[in-house]
Image (spheres, rainbow, N blue to C red):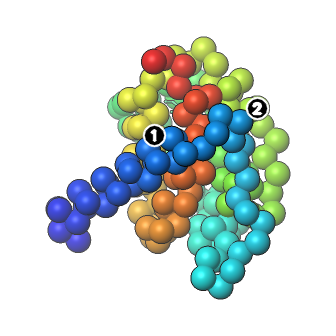
């Protein structure tokens, strides 16, 4: 992939994110549900993420990379990495239409008092995209996952 391909791809992802943020109503922000039916033309996102092993790897790798990222490390200094990875994996699994139930805190409560700004939120989205790339998740599936997560910025970002 050339540098301009990469740039175009990054811009496309940012646009999808912005569109998702603008298009979704406020009440859809906490825990949007993926459609329960999938057609041949649109495979279940959960399967595209690699099923249970895929979402488990996604959770742990995302946490590992976030902790290692200098932009995010301060936020995660006291995080319980294993527990957080499991919660993230369940949350992504459920959002993607998989057979899991996320039982953690809602996004507002989980991130209250962390003083997360938009820059930190975007950094985490970038780290997530890198993680998805490393797991060879197809770009269309990456966009679908980002569109499900993007509206959560309303609950996660508290410094505006
Ligand atoms: C769409 C974006 C995000 C999602 C889906 C998400 C998801 C989650 C989930 C599921 C938890 C666990 C809640 C629980 O244990 O009950 C959590 C906790 C946490 N999140 Fe996020 N998060 C997002 C954005 C962010 C951002 C941008 C930051 C920091 C820059 C962040 C930092 C943390 C921290 C530090 C914890 C607590 C970890 C611990 O105490 O072990 N999150 N998040």
Please provide percent x and percent y for residue 146: 52, 52
Please provide percent x and percent y for residue 77: 52, 25
Front residue of this view, candidates 123 and 81: 123
Ligand 1 contact, mark 2 (Cβ < 8 Å): yes
Please provide percent x and percent y for residue 160: 45, 18
Residue found at x 48% / y 17%: 159
Please provide percent x and percent y for residue 8: 26, 60
- Residue at disc 2, secondary structure: loop
In the image as oriented, which residue stretches furthest toward the bottom? Answer: 40
Image mark for residue 124 = 1
Q: Is residue 99 above or below residue 122?
A: below
Work out whether residue 77 can be spotted: no
Residue found at x 35% / y 57%: 12
Q: Are marks 1 and 2 in contact (CB under 8 Å)?
A: no
Front residue of this view, candidates 116 and 36: 36
Q: Is residue 99 above or below residue 20?
A: below
- Residue at disc 1, secondary structure: helix
Residue found at x 76% / y 32%: 105
Front residue of this view, candidates 99 and 23: 23
Work out whether residue 104 can be spotted: yes
Total labels: the figure holds 2
Image mark for residue 105 = 2
Ligand 1 contact, mark 1 (Cβ < 8 Å): yes
Task: Classify the position of the N terminus by image quarter.
Answer: bottom left
Could you give the CA–CA distance between mark 1 and mark 2, rounded to whole angstroms?
19 Å
Residue found at x 65% / y 34%: 26
Q: Is residue 54 above or below residue 7?
A: below
Dot 2 crowding, Cα within 10 Å, few <14, some 14–19, many 20+:
few
> Which quadrant of the frame does ligand 1 lie within?
top right
């Amino acid at each position: 992939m050339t540098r301009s391909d990469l740039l175009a791809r990054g811009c496309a992802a940012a646009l999808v994110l912005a569109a998702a943020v603008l298009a979704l109503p406020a009440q859809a922000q906490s825990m949007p549900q993926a459609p329960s039916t999938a057609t041949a033309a649109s495979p279940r996102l959960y399967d595209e993420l690699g099923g249970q092993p895929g979402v488990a790897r996604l959770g742990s790798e995302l946490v590992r990379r976030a902790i290692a990222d200098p932009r995010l490390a301060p936020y995660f200094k006291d995080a319980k990495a294993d527990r957080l990875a499991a919660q993230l994996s369940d949350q992504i699994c459920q959002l993607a239409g998989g057979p899991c139930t996320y039982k953690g805190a809602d996004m507002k409560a989980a991130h209250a008092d962390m003083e997360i700004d938009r820059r930190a939120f975007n950094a985490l989205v970038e780290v997530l995209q890198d993680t998805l790339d490393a797991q060879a998740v197809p770009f269309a599936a990456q966009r679908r996952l980002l569109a499900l997560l993007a509206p959560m910025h309303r609950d996660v970002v508290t410094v505006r």
